[in-house]
Image (spheres, coloured by chain):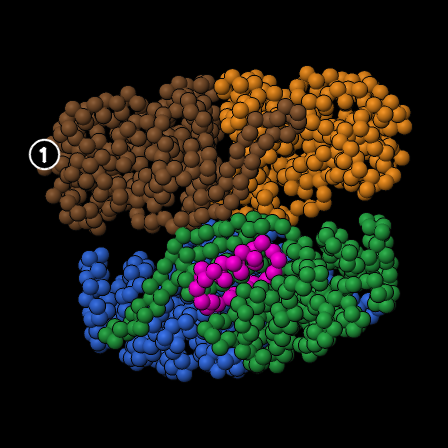
Chain colours: A green, B blue, C brown, D orange
Amino acid sequence: MLKIAIIGYGYWGPNLLRNFSLVDGCEVAAVVDRREERLRAVKRLYPAVDVYTSAEEVMKDPSIDALVVATPVFSHYPLASEALSKGKHVLIEKPMTTSSADATELIELAQKKGRVLMVDHTFLYTGAVKKIKDIVDMGVIGRLQYFDSVRINLGLFNPEVNVVWDLAPHDISILLHINNEMPESVIATGISHTHNSIENIAYITLNYQSNLIAHFHCSWSSPVKIRKILIGGTNKMIMFDDVEPTEKLRVYDTSYKVSPVSDEDKYNILVDYRLGDIFLPRVSQEEALSGVAKDFISAISKGTEPVSNWKNGLGVVKVLEAAQKSIKSRGREVKI
Amino acid sequence: MLKIAIIGYGYWGPNLLRNFSLVDGCEVAAVVDRREERLRAVKRLYPAVDVYTSAEEVMKDPSIDALVVATPVFSHYPLASEALSKGKHVLIEKPMTTSSADATELIELAQKKGRVLMVDHTFLYTGAVKKIKDIVDMGVIGRLQYFDSVRINLGLFNPEVNVVWDLAPHDISILLHINNEMPESVIATGISHTHNSIENIAYITLNYQSNLIAHFHCSWSSPVKIRKILIGGTNKMIMFDDVEPTEKLRVYDTSYKVSPVSDEDKYNILVDYRLGDIFLPRVSQEEALSGVAKDFISAISKGTEPVSNWKNGLGVVKVLEAAQKSIKSRGREVKI
Amino acid sequence: MLKIAIIGYGYWGPNLLRNFSLVDGCEVAAVVDRREERLRAVKRLYPAVDVYTSAEEVMKDPSIDALVVATPVFSHYPLASEALSKGKHVLIEKPMTTSSADATELIELAQKKGRVLMVDHTFLYTGAVKKIKDIVDMGVIGRLQYFDSVRINLGLFNPEVNVVWDLAPHDISILLHINNEMPESVIATGISHTHNSIENIAYITLNYQSNLIAHFHCSWSSPVKIRKILIGGTNKMIMFDDVEPTEKLRVYDTSYKVSPVSDEDKYNILVDYRLGDIFLPRVSQEEALSGVAKDFISAISKGTEPVSNWKNGLGVVKVLEAAQKSIKSRGREVKI
Amino acid sequence: MLKIAIIGYGYWGPNLLRNFSLVDGCEVAAVVDRREERLRAVKRLYPAVDVYTSAEEVMKDPSIDALVVATPVFSHYPLASEALSKGKHVLIEKPMTTSSADATELIELAQKKGRVLMVDHTFLYTGAVKKIKDIVDMGVIGRLQYFDSVRINLGLFNPEVNVVWDLAPHDISILLHINNEMPESVIATGISHTHNSIENIAYITLNYQSNLIAHFHCSWSSPVKIRKILIGGTNKMIMFDDVEPTEKLRVYDTSYKVSPVSDEDKYNILVDYRLGDIFLPRVSQEEALSGVAKDFISAISKGTEPVSNWKNGLGVVKVLEAAQKSIKSRGREVKI
């Protein structure tokens, strides 16, 4: 029976606790949070779980096999680093770290120590993303041509990181998951409407050596909630609308073929459009976080490769880092 | 009775002919197109209109008071220039010209000759945009904070100009119309999935000295048709969804106020969100092009200032030009 | 070359004239309407067409092969009857007549005279209904269990017939077309909010000997326009949403199987629900009325059986008649 | 401190327990359910609550002030009757009883004993219905002309009562709440696609002496979930779409005025349509059941009149009873 400790019991904490409690082969032994009232909430629902206001106890407790780090992002690196050093497996909330240097260090440490290091990009375990991955892998949509994501709503303004670090990790991790290719460069723009210079609106373009373009629109300032990804392939196109309660996925049998323009009539280009049927596959409604928990436990106990692995986690941080740099230098292209 | 000649009878030609035919105080005297079958189509519906395969005749005919230039964009400048030189008033289809230098020259010529020079940014005459302008002018939404436009659909690939010159003029003209302020610089990215290097997807950010950001997403490669503009003010927000048949406009009584973060608890920023009622004003269904035609005739005969004036037309060309330059230099910031 | 005369040039007239003008093998020789200004409108667009203020001329002109009767419904019977007597083929606008007795008489006359008698249930020629018919005929949805139609919007109040005769013919003709079975009885309710006792809201249930139920909700008093038909089969279900510009049809791979309740636990019924994928077939965008015109001409010149034949037309009138009777007797069941 | 017992801990039980636990001035002292595993679930979350497999204990315990009856509908009457006889206050789940005779008996008993008898029509406590009630009461929409409700989805087939008793109580209680007028008669149709003759689809019309018509479409057999009420008044119209996560209510500034037809032109009726703005009021997101619990406790302790009072509960049962009778007699009009 693997013993797990959860560090940080904020917004996501109760979900982590509930899901890990239900996974076979592990038990949640401890929860750490410096806010006493959060710990009392744990005790009320799970009287058997130990609670602490600091991570010290669980770090030095050799019976704790693995840590789930669910604290604000700036503390991911020190906590994960200490845990790995002490031979514990680590699952980190997204985004992995505040820099790719930190992420790389953690990865090397995990490899040296032979421990599992995984990032909780929960979206990769949703029915919708699993179905998209299947469709893309089967070659249904053809070669990827564009990936366009809009993730906007009102609030919650985050005081520590800008809207890019808050919202884009979801979409970047999905892109890296379905298309295993790092972008060549990033060009990003944004604005802060607050006094703290933390951007609340941002636009990010990823350039690729292949014929792909990716774009992310993130905002905390929209009166409507939009969570929409358009994926264009040479054969078909996919729309993932996460606001829809059940009809999240649409596969459009739509494409266009462009032929060289004839010499005689340069006013007409030969584009063959195809607007065909639309298919809405039913997607699993199983809770994604349950998949994360099982995948982490399986990686530890059976040595399986987790879906949301450190490569994806590191890739996401590299893109975020470049996007941040590009915004701060007014849209300068930042190589990755 | 003002006599009008229409140069170019393509996609938009029948609409121009029909609308100008119905305006009091003017008559369409001639239509020019080099395609004989297009001229036959004119004759069938309007037997009294003269038709020509070249503009020569109407240029030298002193009884023609005004020209409507509805040819491909590269010929706007020479045709308008000749017409103005010959003392004719000119209405040019959007975008005005292929360069701001050309546009400036036309404007100076029009001023020297004392003739009306107007650009057909039809959208400015739609019920929806007129209502938005009213709402913004009355101060209802407060100071403008963002303007986000998505104009995407499948095709039609244009062989002469990229998706920016094809689709963005609509949205840029709307932005300049409701907010009389030129951006400081433009950062744009895009991709061409065709052999002719003409971009079919583009993303454009406009930076302002004020606290405003504007962004345009244009695409000929989307399986769904989206025509959506989000306008964020300090007090309220507007969504203009042009795909909706009747409910095109939504005014959200939504805003957020950000207060300085307290020193003690840096984990919490003080943001006061307000999610209020939504108001869908009924907008006029009158045909916008009818408004364009009347405005042009009124400008000629009564000396009124047209809504879609050359300032707006020039501003649009400047932004397009800068966007084009930025895309071709991989997102470099281009000052305006 | 068949010569056609159109009697009645109201709302639908220009569409009939335009579509019949484009069908090979026929020409529109005359248009009749008692309103002079309507006839001038015909002359402007089609100078070669003869126009009359009364049907007398075309009735006695032996060169006129066929009549399209597009007058208010009460004059359908006398006009069609006279035309058939004179050996002309007849296409009647929906609904066929104001009573099934009249319809039956016309049918017998047409058979005696060996002439084509067809009803313009345009909807049967739309891409969407043709696709539904194909899907049902191929057995995809299984046995029909329910047909639920909602056709509501604001106005136009009709001064001659109630909302049932105005709106329900569309949906009843679709039902009879895809399921060749007359209902056993009709139960209908409704209300008139006007002084003339003409119902503006009505609800109609059709009972069948088979396990089918059909229901129609018609209204001129709704602030929203809804045009939605739900068709439930034992295997799949279809939704036809005619307000959608392109995505009119949805085939749900959804069904339920009900097993006999177990004796022990009468609190649970064994229902096996299946919520599967959704398929949106692309439907033809061809103008339906063009199909009507071609079908009529083909029936005359080649003897083919038209899709919108008199059986469908008569069936619709029988249901309307029974519905009317039921409403007026406060929902009494009216046998058909 | 009032002591409450909840009888029946099924689907709705946990919500009742949670909400009553949070109301000031009362405590949940006991939960009764004959299923042991349901009682264990209670104990896990609320160790202090007593649990019983039969209602006997709580009935005879004089310290229990009030009962919440959340058992299947057929047991509502005996349980409520016994509780009232023993001087306890009673809140009954909807629908109140299986017959209006039973309901009337309970009401008389409650009045004799001076105890509160209330029905849990939760919908009356939702932000949306409260807002509708306000709008109607303020005279905004004018005189009520129609009330049209559609409540359809896939399953859950109920083995005890038909779809009318399962789904219609929500909409009937809303109608009676906003318009304090009993219908004159009911005409209903329906069908059972199961072996047990329990209808899974039903259509119900309510006739009124005033100029109002109400209609309810209930179904367990729809592939799509629709929860929509249209309310037409002489001045404005309301749409309540309960499937929408936030935009549940739309007030249409839409109406029509019908004038007497002129004598000269009987082809035209004078209808003046008004299609105006649309207003989407923000509605409270507070949990409705919390309002029910507070209202019950307030009625007991302060003698206030509850919103979901026995008049509403009795009215709902009368309509359901009549609808059932009408369906079983093939749509015969049943007077109320």
Residue C187: image quadrant is: top left
Name the residue located 76 percent from the left edge and 36 percent from the top edge: D37
Count of numbered marks: 1
* Place of residue C3 in the rendered image (x, y in percent of width and height, measured from the top left): 14, 40
Picture quadrant where residue C71 is located: top left
> Residue at image x 19%, y 40%?
C298
D304 horizontally vs D215: left or right:
right
Query: Can residue C148 be seen from the camera position used here?
Result: no
Residue B116 position, x and y percent, is 37, 73
User: Was residue A137 drawn as part of the magenta stretch in this picture?
Assistant: yes
Q: Which residue is mark 1?
A: C62
Instruction: Say if B111 sits above or below B132 in the image.
Output: below
| Closer to the camera in the image, A312 or D298 | A312
The region drawn magenta spans A124-151
What SS does tag 1 mark?
loop
Across and down, in percent, residue B14 comes to: 29, 60
Amino acid residing under circle 1: Pro
Check residue B27 for magenta coloring.
no
Query: Outermost residue, front direction?
Result: A302
State whether residue D247 is above or below residue B157: above
